[in-house]
Image: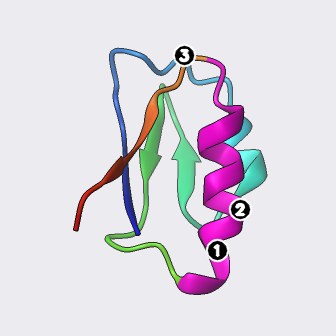
Amino acid sequence: MKVKVVEDKCIGCGYCESTCSEVFEVEDYSHVKVDKVPEDLVEAVTNAIEGCPTEAIEKIEE
């Protein structure tokens, strides 16, 4: 799984980072720290996607 954060939608609330800090980091807005999400973190990243209040996290087709 690969994901990206759409900067124009992100409000930097930190939900994704608090859900999966191994993949997401928030400065002014969130960004993805890895090229590909490790298998053991897919569930946490899916929770971050579903919980993002602005729907700024998107899956990238591989």
- Left or right, 33 with reference to 55: left
Query: Residue 11: which numbered mark, if any?
Result: 3
Spot occupied by residue 31 in the image (x, y as percentages of width and height): 42, 44
Residue 41 lies in quadrant: bottom right
> Distance from label 2 to label 1 (Cα)?
5 Å
Q: Nearer the viewer, residue 4 or 59?
A: 59
> Distance from label 2 to label 3 (Cα)?
20 Å
Residue 48 lies in magenta, yes or no?
yes
Query: Residue 41: which numbered mark, if any?
Result: 1
Crowdedness of circle 2 by 10 Å Cα count: few (<14), some, many (20+)? some
> Distance from label 3 to label 1 (Cα)?
23 Å
* Tag 1: amino acid: Leu
Q: Which residue is mark 2?
A: 44
Q: Is residue 40 above or below residue 12?
A: below
Residue at coordinates 66% horizontally, 20% vertically from top-left? Answer: 53
Q: Residue furthest right?
A: 18
Residue 50 lies in quadrant: top right
Q: Residue furthest bottom?
A: 39
Range shown magenta: 39-53
User: If the image is split into quadrants, where does the C terminus sit?
Assistant: bottom left
Residue at coordinates 42% horizontally, 54% vertically from top-left? Answer: 32
Crowdedness of circle 1 by 10 Å Cα count: few (<14), some, many (20+)? some
Crowdedness of circle 3 by 10 Å Cα count: few (<14), some, many (20+)? some
Q: Which is the main secondary structure of the residues drawn in magenta?
A: helix
Q: Is residue 15 above or below residue 53?
A: below
- Left or right, 18 with reference to 33: right
Query: Can you tell which of label 3 and label 1 is closer to the viewer?
Result: 1
Residue at coordinates 76% horizontally, 51% vertically from top-left? Answer: 19
- Left or right, 30 with reference to 22: left
